[in-house]
Amino acid sequence: MEKDLSVLLAECLKISPRQKELYLTALTHSSYAHEHNLGGNAHNERLEFLGDAVLELTVSEMLYHRFPRVPEGKLTRFRAGLVCEESLVRLAEKLQLGAYLRLGRGEAASGGRRRPSLLADALEALLGAIYLDLGFAAVRKVVAELFQPLFNELENGSLLNDYKTLLQEYTQAKMAMTPEYIIVRESGPDHDKIFVAQLLLGGRIYGEGSGRSKKEAEQEAARAAYERLVNNK
């Protein structure tokens, strides 16, 4: 059951929207838009594209000021851990974002409100909507409060590792190679797909992983490869 959008905006994000329709679009999945004949762009994919860039800039600025003595390479790794899908899903679940999503009947029935890729995309789309509606300062304020627990974990070393970044740093330093990812299989219906990714170095397979999104599958493949290389397996 969808919740009242005003509760999310006013109580959870602590913003006063000017263009509520933007936020409604940010929470509309393509399955809902197609099912209700809302038009080609009446879903959150364009806002997610914008929100991804806005989030990266916001987090980059915060890291730059918060860690004045940390070099660029390490800041890049910090940022990757903060904006990866796993981190975004944690924050989306804290906001109970799944309850606000507008999903098609099939997507909702198959567990779409809990699907990691949908939650992460919706959170980025919301940030894109805030940027368009209220400007960068408002996004900065929302991200600063929302991401504070993750920044605390980053400082104490407990934030989840981003294995794609870890692996790339390792292979470039030790092997002078850049990892290549390929999606080798997709299975299941459109609303509940499973992707399988392989990680290649110099044309050789070093890791394989699966997930409900391409990003998740690539992370799992990177994790397998990183553990193999580090443990000399």
Image: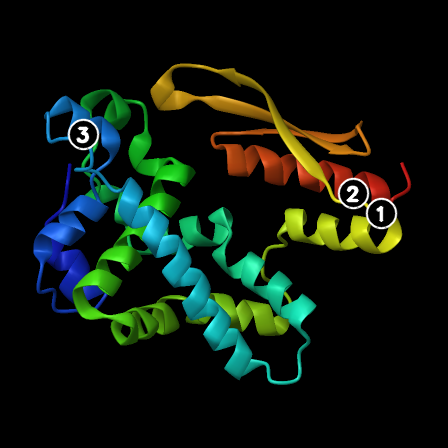
Verify CB contact (< 8 Å) between mark 2 and mark 1.
Answer: yes
Residue plotted at (76% across, 44% down): 226
Q: Position of residue 78 (x, y in %)?
A: 60, 65
Q: Check disc 2 and give the amino acid type.
A: Glu
Q: Check disc 3 and give the amino acid type.
A: Tyr
Q: Check disc 1 and give the amino acid type.
A: Val
Q: Which residue is mark 3?
A: 32
Q: Quadrant of the N terminus?
A: top left
Q: Tell me the SS state at disc 3.
A: helix
Q: Distance of mark 2 from mark 3, alpha carbons?
A: 40 Å
Q: Position of residue 169 (x, y in %)?
A: 75, 55
Q: Distance of mark 1 from mark 3, alpha carbons?
A: 45 Å
Q: Identify the mark at residue 230; answer none if there is no mark.
A: 1
Q: Earlier in the sequence, mark 2 or mark 3?
A: 3
Residue plotted at (84% across, 49% down): 176
Q: Tell me the SS state at disc 1.
A: helix
Q: Quadrant of the C terminus?
A: top right
Q: Position of residue 18 (x, y in %)?
A: 8, 65
Q: Which residue is mark 2?
A: 227
